Image: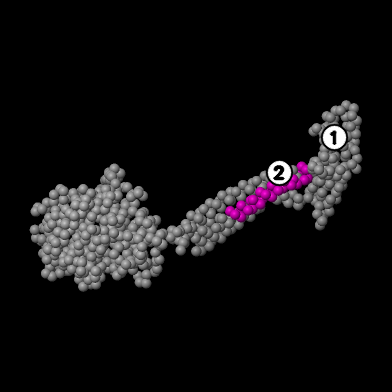
Amino acid sequence: MMVSMTSSRWIHAALSAMLIAALGACRDPAELSGAVSAVLVVVDVDADQVVDVDIADLALRARPKSGDNLVSFNLALPAGTHIGSVVVSDVDDEEERARDCGTVTIVVPEARPDGPVLSAVVADELGECPELEDDRDETDETDEVDEVDEVDSDR
Amino acid sequence: VVLSLVPLRVGLLLALLSAGASRASSTSVPPTGSATAPSARVIVVVGHNGGAPDLRPPLRYADDDAARLYLQLAPGSARAFLLTTFDAESARLYPDLVDVARPPTTTSLAGALGEAFWHLREEKDRGKSTELVFAFAGHGDVDDSGRGFVVLSDGPFFRHDLQTQVVRGSPADLNHILVDACASYYFVKSRGGSDDGVALTPQLLDVLTADAQAAPSAADQARTGVLVSTSSAQETHESAALSAGVFSYLLRSALAGAGDINGDGRVEYAEAAAFVASASQGLDDPRARLRVHAEAPLQRPHAPLLSLKDSGAKSFLAVEPGRPTRLRLKDSRGLPLVEVHSDGAKPVYIALSGQPFFLVERGDEEAILVPRSAGAFALSALSFAKAPTARGDDSRGAFAPLFARPFSRAFVDGYLLQAELPPLHANTSADVAFAPEWAVSFAPKSAIPIGVVGGVFAGGAGLVGAGAAVAVVMNQLAFSTLEQGFLQTGQLDPAQSLEVEGWRNAATGLTVGAVGLALLGGSLIAWSFSLEDGALVLP
């Protein structure tokens, strides 16, 4: 009887460990959403445009969803002030042309009782990308797309 | 070295003989008569305890043995004769037979045989096959000229008389001669100082053995079988605990069905002789050992001494296979009737007849069996209860080791090799197996194999656990894709998130299921160890 009791405990422990291990091995989307400290929303983005955000060590790129004119970025930023760049580019037949460029400053406090910090940028209020003006001139004149790619690449 | 080689050589010889026997059995034809109409049987049972003027100390149970064999064989016979004089005790036990029994005299026997032969001829005229069963229980001895005889109340009945009056005179197609003789007189004389006696061997009463005065003809030999047992002294011939002569008790058990080792419902000479040998093989006292001689009719070596189907019995106790079972049946008076020690390889059917109810003893528990309806009564369907008093074998004295070992096919095959009896038919397929219908409400109880169910649950737990592992892997892959997209776009793809969640939920559910099944299966397996045969018998 003692043996069976001991065995029973071992079996119970082994099965419990199996349950815990299986649950622990599983991943949850909340692991990603829970780390988000700031949300950057870029509005007035056309359907044929793509938005690139470069802030801290993050380089993100997204398009507006169908029917939307905005793009939101969930950013896992540490506490502090972060200055990054926002570039809105036109996409046409796989060709991209940087159109609106600007900077964005996001301040992430140590404590965020209300959740992630929300920042919004209006695409139309961003300045035109300097390189883009040159490119546009050249494009208008020469219609050479490769140079735009180079500018974009340089950027 | 020589000693060690002997068993090897014997083993080789047995192996060769066994191979030959296997070939013989594999080429033999099915038993005739198993599917044909039953033979018309006439039985003549003689039992004589002895007593004055005979000098031999009287036996106690020869009359009882004759009565019980008569009750066992009469229901399946066309005509039955009982020749015995009951002592006072037996007359109380068998009041219905007192008026039936004729005196065990040579004259009365001649009359009974005359009637028996007349009946047999009548049956033959009707076109039936016929059989005569002649059985004797009582004293036997050897006269000064070396002639074996059995003792009737008015004098000796010699083997010569058996040959001429019974075997040769019988018109039956088959004769069965069963003799249970106690040769106490010779040993009494020996103790008295005379050493000129000759021990009575079974062969001295074998009607088929050549006799100077009346050698049996080849035709008589061909249609006659003998089963003879002799014992050396009264104290080892009878058992008060059995209320019977030991050989008669064993023979009765064999004929009741316990000897039917191949399950065809027919107890042949070979089976009966092997049963007696098996049941008595544990006897340590050399005086208690039975000397049995069996010869089956040459014409019909597989002729049954008794066919359960034609025995007249309507009810049977079914000892189910699966495990060795040892039990004893007592009659309504509490007297031992039949004993069985099955090895569990095949079902054993014990004919129940001649008694209003039976007491079934198994170990230290017992059950009452009232055969109210025809059919088989499963042993597992009986309601056993602890016996109020111990039912041990101590009271058997020298015969306590009887039935110590189970009766098995392996023993029978080995016994038949050295007994020079024909091997049993290998044909024991379902079409010839004896299997009466179950009696109403006495079919075997349903049983849930808890161990097997536990094993199934445990196996299911393994499968579900494997499913859980797959779900975990899929969750990891889906999360990896989600994370990659998140790091590139800063957005959580809802569809991908749902997939991750789905696999996670599946893994959780399957793991919980696997753990639950494993716990349940393990518990059932553990429980099964405490159950008989690992099964839960339903009420």
Q: Amino acid at mark 1?
A: Arg
Q: Which residue is mark 2?
A: B481
Q: Residue furthest top?
A: A142
- Tell me, yes or no, if residue B58 can be seen here: yes
Q: Toward which corner of the image does residue B513 lie, by quadrant?
A: bottom right
Q: Which residue is mark 1?
A: A97
Give the side of residue A119 with respect to residue B111, left or right. Answer: right
Label 1 crowd (10 A; few <14 / some 14-19 / many >=20): many
Q: Residue at x 22, y 56 (%)?
A: B41
**Residue A58's spot in the image, x, y percent?**
79, 44
Provide the chain ID for the residue under circle 2: B
Query: In the image, is residue B495 part of the stretch drawn in magenta?
Result: yes
Q: Residue furthest front?
A: B126
Label disc, if present, on residue B537 of the rendered structure: none
Look at the magenta stretch and give its main secondary structure: helix
- Tell me, yes or no, if residue A80 can be seen here: no
Dot 2 falls on a residue whose secondary structure is helix
Give the side of residue A23 with respect to residue B360, left or right. Answer: right
**Residue B172's spot in the image, x, y percent?**
18, 53
